[in-house]
Amino acid sequence: MAIRPLPGRRSLLKGSLAVSAGLALPAFTRSGRPAAEWGVQTGDVTRDSALVWVRSDRPARMIVETSATESFRDVRRMRGPLIGPGTDFTGTTRLRGLPPGEQIHYRVLLADPDDPRRTSAPVAGAFRTVPDRRRDGVRFVWSGDLAGQGWGINLEFGGYRIFDAMARLDPDFCLFSGDTVYADGPIAASAELPDGSLWRNITTEEKSKVAESLAEFRGAFRYNLLDEHLRRFNARVPSIVQWDDHEVRNNWYPGQRIADTDTRYTEKSVDVLAARARRAFGEYFPMSTPRPGAREGRVHRVVRQGPLLDVFVLDMRTYRNANSPGDQTVDPQGILGREQLDWLKRELARSRAVWKVIAADMPIGLVVPDTTEGRPHVEAVAQGDPGAPLGRELQIAELLRFIKHRRITGTVWLTADVHHTSAQHYQPARAAFGDFEPFWEFVSGPLNAGAFPATELDATFGPERVWVKAPTTANVSPAGGYQFFGEVEIDGGSGELTVRLREMDGTVLFRKTLQPGLVGQ
């Protein structure tokens, strides 16, 4: 499906269009009909339902048509919401009553609220519903970290071309493991590369500074949709999304106050920034959670993918305690909060899927430091002390113990965040805390951001880094390589789960196959 490149609602900044002759984005114009030039997305697809997303250029009625064939010979039409400035002209329609395990073709039209005969050109996409039959198998991809460290959309480089490599695998869905935007990372027109050449970004007004206002957070999400590879991918591959820190601000936690010395921010309350970011996040992704303001408006959830797979999407931001040295001997809040931890334990015990993927937006045994406040604090779980669990490790120890004693089979941890790719095996025989069964944690990313050296391992849960690929210097640009995604394939016959860690072009770097029905392996 050809998708025309487009600019933002605001004009692109001067100087940013010199990226490649003949590839400049066309000027934004308002015709007599609504337009859906930001593409379409689907999210949290189930066996009989899906969420479809679109953005209009003006107030409009969202209409979704579905068909079993690409020709749309027999069409089912759903009348969606009126969309307008209250949601930044984004809207979501839930499709219900779909056949399980089938390819669904859809197209979105936007109708003028005053004259329904005046509609936009249709924007088409497709997805597969979750199968009822185990033998159909499951394939998905995962990664995170998009447009970070100032490395934005560079048309000379080919834009976000990693999404084309992921699309070639024809996955059932994509797990976006956080840092879906860098609201705290301005995008300049250019940046110098080690060889003296320039990396040239598309830029927009909203991305010229850190996001503080709701409009600026919305602009951060809109920025990525300027890329044609991402829009093509969104139209064909459903998403399961979670957030981490850069949707708001680097290493944020609830209740944090930004230091007066950080003059980039006039709004000093991180809670205020997080509320605005969460609203924009909910507007720009199709997620099966209510919009902000509802009690259940949350990121953590279970997305069931048939007999073979349940995906447990964690939120390791909203409920965490303040970053600290992580040496406390009692820590009931931890990184998940008590309510989310109890939810996770309950849902894991309830799951009858062969595989339970725990989608964590931060790693377990990799030490991720936080020095943003001038002190050596802990940003993730591990704090570098190889002894008995302390700080946030106490909560993870409680979860791992629960999985062992409840005999919960098939748990695998997937994450991103650290801007390199690796495979860690956790083994109680190597650990200071031994009351758990062995498990694997796989790391991927970034999608298009700076790459960083591998971080130190914490021996508390006995991790062994079985494989890793990472640069030796910090903030290597996408032009320098080290851009990664992961693939998970579950065979419908044997039930085996195979993880492949891949480079930007799709090359397989590492492969591991796990056997079904085991508590630990």
Image (tube, grey):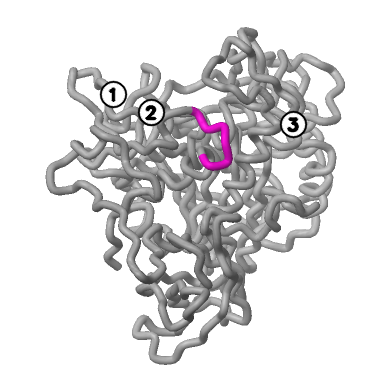
Residue type, label 2:
Gly
Identify the disc placed on residue 191. Answer: 1
Q: Is residue 468 left or right of residue 387?
A: left
Mark with earlier residue (1, 3): 1
Q: Nearer the viewer, residue 413 or 197?
A: 197
Q: Quadrant of the N terminus?
A: bottom left
Which is nearer the N-term, disc 2 or disc 3? 2
User: Helix or strand or loop: what does disc 2 sit on?
Assistant: loop
Q: Quadrant of residue 370?
A: top right
The answer to which of 400 and 102 lies nearer the viewer is: 102
Residue 317 higher or lower than 372, as above or below: below
Q: How many marks?
A: 3
Q: Is residue 171 visible?
A: no
Q: Position of residue 511 (x, y in %)?
A: 43, 45
Are the residues flagged by discs 2 and 1 in contact, CB closer than 8 Å?
yes
Label number found at residue 150: 2
Find disc 3 in the rendering and name its residue: 320
| Residue 366: image location, x then y, percent | 58, 25
| Secondary element at image label 1 | strand
Distance from disc 1 to disc 3, alpha carbons, whole Å, reads 35 Å
